[in-house]
Image (cartoon, rainbow, N blue to C red):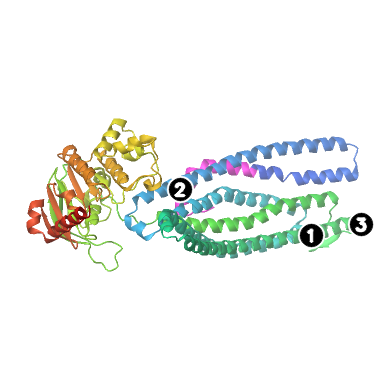
Amino acid sequence: MLFEKHMRKYYLRYSWLYLIGIISLVAVDVAQVFIPGYLGDVVNIVTRKPDDALEQMSHIILMILVIALVMFLGRMLWRFALFNASGKIEGDFRHEMFLKSERLSQKYYHENKVGSIMSWFTTDLETIEEYCGFGTVTLVDATFLGILVIVKMVLLDWALAIIAFIPMILIIIWGFLIEKFMSKKWTERQECFDDLYDFTQETFTGIRVIKAFVKENAELHAFAKIARKNKDKNVSFARVSVIFDVLIEIIIAAIMSMILLIGGWAVYSISTGEAMVIFGHEINMDAGMLVTFTSYFDLLIWPMIAMGQIVAMRSRAKASLKRVANFLDTEEDIKNPENAYVLNNVSGKITFNHFTFVYPDSKAKIPSLTDITFEIKPGEAIGIVGKIGCGKTTLVNSLLRLYNVEKGTIMIDDHDLMECDITSIRDSIAYVPQDNFLFSDKIYNNIAFSNRSIDRVKIENAARFADVHDNIADFKNGYDTVSGERGVTLSGGQKQRIAIARAYIKDSPIMIMDDSVSAVDVKTEETILHNIKEKRDGKTTIVIASRVSTVKDLDRILVLNDGKVEAYDSHDNLLKISKTYQRMVYLQELEKEVEGGNN
């Protein structure tokens, strides 16, 4: 069994199932070691033909039937207990890993690919489950059955038993020697599987780009190369495993041949009146005893084969558990401070006080934002504009506590962001992300993501707020239409507006829209902005935009330039004081004129 720290709590939790299973398994082992003795008695009855032969045979048949019943019930019970326990451990492990994945920061997912993480959740957990279930059966069964049979064989004839045991010791030593090597081979195999998983996941995600650039053949060749490497690693591991199994089979066959040869010669010697002597021990073995001894060895074959299976399973499970444990032991960058302040009744006041931000994984350590200082009053609707890459999204991601920031640099209602409870921070903010991610689910459930119990009227009102209700109503299945993976069945504008509806229905005191109307027409944009002013009056709203028309009617506009605040004022004042803003207005006015001329 694996006694790594993450496993111990599960063994303890399901110890009652393991106890029932192991007791049942041992009971089966104890029952079946009686069978060789009865087989030997049957041979002796047939060869000697005593007067009460029929009575003895009837008794033996009855006892074998009782043993068969005990074995049948015992096997049912241990299967239910041990495989049930291993399944529960796998489920609990996966649940613990999922909760861990939710707590890890953005940095972790920048450094680790989705495909690799998914392989930990699937193949690695399945490998651990196999060892917790079938591995436990194999280990316990091989140990107890092996000990019981060895004792019986020694009691029957210790000299012949020693001859049978010498190769077994070699198998055990060989198993311990090869375990580390097989564990290394399995780790290499799993890493190749990670690469295959990564490539496949990335290909399916970008399938439209691949088709658009007619790169199907190139991707096929790339996949074939990765698949070939994966195949080679699998074959390499299988080769080592098979060689080990074949070696055990050869040793077993050799031992059986030796037992039959020596035992047969001993029986023949007894019939001639000259007993065989080995190690100074006289072997007195008749035909019945030889059948009993060989039957015991036949029972011992499974424990010997099981040794090979245990080595293979344990090496795989150790390698997989190490990968899973590394994931579970990953330090959580984003976590609550001690005695965290829980935000309640948030007014929406936000303060940035000399805020500077450097991405944790940035090697150059160049700040994305430098000395950002401004304040959003409760209930204000403000816009954030600037060139691409100036730090607009980074600014709001910091507000969502997706990254750690310096204490005292960001405040919500005059409470330091780093001293606040993370859940209460995010509960206070409704967020429309830049990528407008939608789940492969009904549109209804996508909008109601923050509260699945919300009624349909509010769902439809949220859709009207985002000016997408009519579009949804035109679909054949209306709000029951499945959006497809990442909203693939919807247009860009529809995805944006559904994401806005999803955020609006949360009714949070702070709402952030990160370039969320870039894919809609001007009329729809005006409708959404009008609804923001009307429906979110008295609540703080932050709108990041690439078009000046999106933010010009908001209370104030923050202009970022190269990660710094250039200006923070109303539209009219920015036209006087901000060169960046003036240039944005000029270029967009020029674009309108060009479009008008073309028309």
Q: CA distance from mark 1 to mark 3?
A: 24 Å
User: In the image, 512: left or right of 178?
Assistant: left
Q: Amino acid at mark 2?
A: Phe
Can residue 538 be found in the magenta stretch? no
Q: CA distance from mark 2 to mark 1?
A: 47 Å
Up/down of 460 relative to 184, above or below: above
- What SS does tag 1 mark? helix
In the image shown, does 135 or 396 lie closer to the viewer?
Answer: 396
Q: Which residue is mark 2?
A: 93
| Contact? badges 2 and 1 (CB < 8 Å) | no
| The label number, if any, that marks residue 413 in the structure image | none
Work out whether mark 2 precedes mark 1 in sequence or the reverse, and give the earlier one. Answer: 2
| Residue range (magenta) | 1-26
Circle 3 crowding by C-alpha within 10 Å: few under 14, some 14–19, many from 20? few
Can residue 22 be found in the magenta stretch? yes
Q: Amino acid at mark 1?
A: Ser
User: In the image, 246: left or right of 460?
Assistant: right
Q: Which residue is mark 3?
A: 273
Q: Which residue is mark 1?
A: 257
| Contact? badges 1 and 3 (CB < 8 Å) | no
Work out whether mark 1 precedes mark 3 in sequence or the reverse, and give the earlier one. Answer: 1
Q: Amino acid at mark 3?
A: Gly
Q: Main secondary structure of the magenta part?
A: helix
Q: Residue at x 87, y 36 (%)?
A: 54
